[in-house]
Amino acid sequence: MTGWSNWSGRARSEHAEVRFVRSIDDLAAIVAAATEHGRCVRVAGSGHSHFPLVPTDDVIVDVSALSGVVSVDTDRMIATMRGGATIASLGRPLHDAGVALPNQGDIDRQTIAGAVATGTHGTGRSLGSLSTRVAGLTLVDATGRIVHCSHAEHPELWRAARLGLGAFGVVIELELSVVPAFRLAESAFATTYDELRPEIDRLVHEHRHAEFFWYPRSDRAFVKVIDETDEPAVYPLADEGARVGWNYEVLPNHRPRIHTEMEFAVPYDRSLDCLDEIRDLLTTEFTDVRMPVEYRTVAPDDVWLSPAYERDTATISVHRLIEFDDGPYFAACERIFRRYDGRPHWGKLHSYTADDLAAAHPRWHEWWSRRDAIDPTGTFLNATLRRWRP
Ligand SMILES: Cc1cc2nc3c(=O)[nH]c(=O)nc-3n(C[C@H](O)[C@H](O)[C@H](O)COP(=O)(O)OP(=O)(O)OC[C@H]3O[C@@H](n4cnc5c(N)ncnc54)[C@H](O)[C@@H]3O)c2cc1C
């Protein structure tokens, strides 16, 4: 098949040769042949990244056939799954084995390898991104060789490749640390921003998950809090904001409106000042924007390229419906995020250069040197990643 595009249709490769991989041998042969001919290979997950991480006019591999849960070790609390599995497809089999991912993002359409590769996160001040759960991973490298890494085996590779942007190889299996299966009760309320603002820190500290969407036209906020519960699940599940069910039933939402998005991770203690500035921008300059601004929190971590690396973090996301030009609005938002030491979400839109990224990420150079060690010829680098290479 020729040509690929992402979920929104904005990131495209008209001439890519798209290969649907059926087996690991098949994958290893495709990658090795591409390397031999000096061609780039990028892996596509579900194409839910807004940032053009996947596009190349050489080879795009789709590993969605390599899916499913491989095993669950309830002594070590490690679940092994194939990289092409969607997050949606993992919830029930993990639950049947008595375990769960402690958190996940706002939707569950992404592949697990794609979500891990960009540091996809949900909300919760004590809950890290999916990359923080990676205890080990297995990839096919540029020569077609299978390489496993973990804290004990190739530890530096493991440290770097936990958030790998598809630049280390094709991830075929992930070992993720899991927790016992748990139920959640969700509640929601609407309020004004002025009423909410003094309460945000309390909500963030009192609840396992707290987040809100602020709507610029009405200046109102839709607040959602979620906590563990012993109450039985209630089926059919209620609408978003009132559900009681298992983790994988309550956490994902339906987000059908096609849009583009920018998200920055900012220091938690300055996040509301940053949000105030975004709000001012929307109420004075970009008064035609209707899509809400989303506010969430993420626990600090030690994942090298994580936007939450070693800092208490809040994330602020801005959206634009696909029919509109997001350029001027996102550029104005990014100017604000920069003043708050913002680190962009890897899967969402931003205009950070290599220098900006190096300044934002203390482990930038180590990440690149690990990457270059496993793929010296740059098979897994497309034009975007090459521009960032130190
Ligand atoms: C509607 C919507 C809601 C979203 N909600 C959230 C959210 O709540 N939280 C959040 O943090 N993000 C969110 N995102 C962003 C999204 O989670 C990330 O962009 C994620 O990376 C998408 O996963 P994917 O499977 O679609 O991967 P793709 O977008 O296809 O690829 C992403 C990256 O992963 C790499 N990759 C994919 N598969 C593999 C593999 N097998 N081996 C190695 N590398 C691989 C790709 O090469 C690429 O670099 C959302 C996006 C959309 C469109």
Image (cartoon, helix red, strand yellow):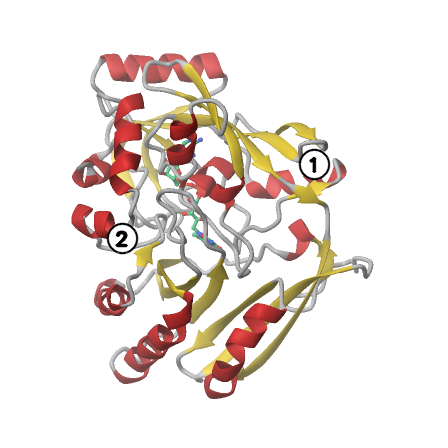
Pick whichever of labels 2 and 1 is earlier in the sequence: 1
Indicate the secondary structure of the residue bearing disc 1. Answer: helix
In this rendering, the label closer to the viewer, 2 or 1:
2
Q: Quadrant of residue 217?
A: bottom left
- Residue 152, above or below 223: above
Horizontal and vertical percent position of residue 32: 32, 13
- Residue 3, above or below 276: above
Horizontal and vertical percent position of residue 329: 26, 69
- Residue 199, above or below 105: below
- Quadrant of the picture in which ligand 1 is shown: top left
The answer to whether one can see residue 87 in this image is: yes
Amino acid type, label 2 = Ala
Amino acid type, label 1 = Pro
Indicate the secondary structure of the residue bearing disc 2. Answer: helix
Q: Which mark is residue 163?
A: none
Residue at 49% from the left image edge and 52% from the top image edge: 121
- The quadrant of the picture occupied by the C terminus is top left
Label 2 sits on residue: 360
- The span from disc 2 to disc 1 (Cα, nearest Å) is 38 Å
Residue at 26% from the left image edge and 70% from the top image edge: 336
Q: Nearer the viewer, residue 158 or 383?
A: 158
The answer to whether one can see residue 325 in this image is: no
Residue at 24% from the left image edge and 49% from the top image edge: 357
- Residue 336 placement, left or right of 61: left
Q: Give the class, few, some or many, for how many residues have Cα within 10 Å of label 1's Cα (few <14, many ≥20).
A: some
Label 1 sits on residue: 93
Horizontal and vertical percent position of residue 360: 27, 53
Q: Quadrant of residue 334?
A: bottom left
